[in-house]
Amino acid sequence: MADIHNSTKVSKRMRKFGVIEIVFCVMQTLLLGVPEFHLPDKIGADDTPLRGHEGEAFKHVRVPYTECDLYFPRDGHQPSTSEAGEWSGARYIGGNDEAVRDWWVRVFGGNEAVETYNPIPSGLAAPPMLEDGHIMIVPMEGSSSFKQQFWRTFRDIASNPVGRVLLYRLLVEILRVDDVTHEGRCEAEINVDDLDERNNCRAIHIFDGAGKGGAFSPEGHILADISNPDLWTTVLTTACPGGTTICQNSCLSQVALFHEMLHWFHFLRNPNRFLESNNANPAVFKYALRCYYGTSVTDLWGSPADSEEIANILGSPNCTDALYQRYIHPSAFLTIPPIRGRSTPVTIRGITQYVPNNRMFLNGDDLSENVYRISMSIPPNRCYMRFGHFTMGTIDIPVLLILPDACKLANTLAINCYCEIMGITDITSINWKLIPGEAIKP
């Protein structure tokens, strides 16, 4: 779950519409430079060109002891899902894949993190990533046993192709800086009121959440509940009549950590959108919620409905993609263009609607907990599709009968995102079932 219930912080951002504030923001923008992706020297990157992307600049890293090549756009933009799959090592099938896994762990936690489960080859320097190489991205708090549990769970995420895409996207956000101020910043087209809190989360503190559950906080920490490998979550299942939706699965401790780290990515990506996602004001445009439910929503996501949890668990579809338009709620968006700011017209089921440009789909929004669940669903494992934010309990309604389009949208989005990450061209080849005994295909 995300800790986004501080109404003071949300209202602070919602009040920034006065003339003085607008003038200040415009002047601040004029004083800024352009974003650039900055890797510390000791990471061993070079500027090797990338075939098919002539005219674009990249930082290239060859992972030591492997033939795995990683590419990061020099302008710090988030690449497409397919590009992230190709450039993050997610598709690497060469020798010594463990070295790729350990590279990602070292980048976030240093040699100490890797050594909790695996000896470090001599002479392989740890790459502290922030402030010219003096600060680790994930400083740890807690006992030695908790640190060991955490980094072994993190290792599992770094071993997973979908996990590598999340770590890649996080690193792009963390190491994108302004070429004038050298401070962290969002992508060029994302305007943010206040970058201080966002940049304070470029390094994240991890605390033991055993018995408390997992949570991400914009204050700069994650509670990680990883002591029990078997965690209950709400998923769609036909195990009981009436739409009862309980499932227990041993893969979920790493899924739970992935979930909180995905909240972390969403906050770094667009902190304004993240903090507005739980606002009770119905006038606040919440993209993920509208895609699935329009302006009305069931109680599966709290009260008021938490759009960030919908985005995190189900993912956000690109509303301009015809693959998803057939399932997006027919009254998802605005019937007339908004008064403030620009908007993009989209046609949903024959009706022209408008989406504010500052709340449109961004590269990386399709990544979700359910995509990770697909990657974990290699027999005999089965991570069923999650639908709802309850950590434990039942849904006493036949969800598939009441919300068929929302369920199909979530299922189609997760399968397609996974296929794009892995370079799979036929999405029907992924037999990830919406519920046990029933496969829903677009």
Image (cartoon, grey):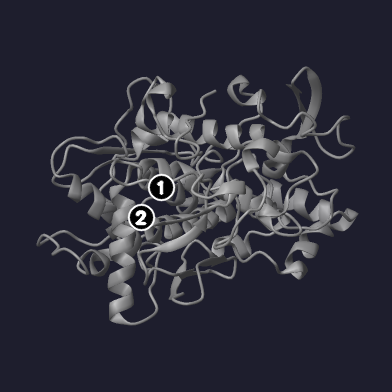
- Rendered image quadrant of residue 40: bottom left
Q: Secondary structure at mark 2?
A: loop
Residue drawn at (64%, 43%) of the image: 399
**Horizontal side, residue 380 vs residue 274: left or right:** left
Q: Quadrant of the N terminus?
A: bottom right
Q: Nearer the viewer, residue 2 or 387?
A: 387
Q: Find residue 76 and name its label.
A: none
- Mark 2 = which residue? 251
Residue drawn at (25%, 36%) of the image: 92
Instruction: Give the residue type at disc 1.
Output: Cys
- Residue 358 seen by the camera: no
As measured in the structure, the alpha-carbon distance from the residue carrying label 1 to the one carrying label 2 is 7 Å
Nearer the N terminus, badge 1 or badge 2?
2
Q: Secondary structure at mark 1?
A: loop
- Mark 1 = which residue? 383
- Rendered image quadrant of residue 334: top right
- Rendered image quadrant of residue 151: bottom left
- Residue 11 seen by the camera: yes
Residue drawn at (32%, 74%) of the image: 147
Instruction: Give the residue type at disc 2.
Output: Cys
Q: Are marks 1 and 2 in contact (CB under 8 Å)?
A: yes
Q: Residue furthest top?
A: 350
**Horizontal side, residue 160 vs residue 188: left or right:** left
Q: Residue furthest left?
A: 122
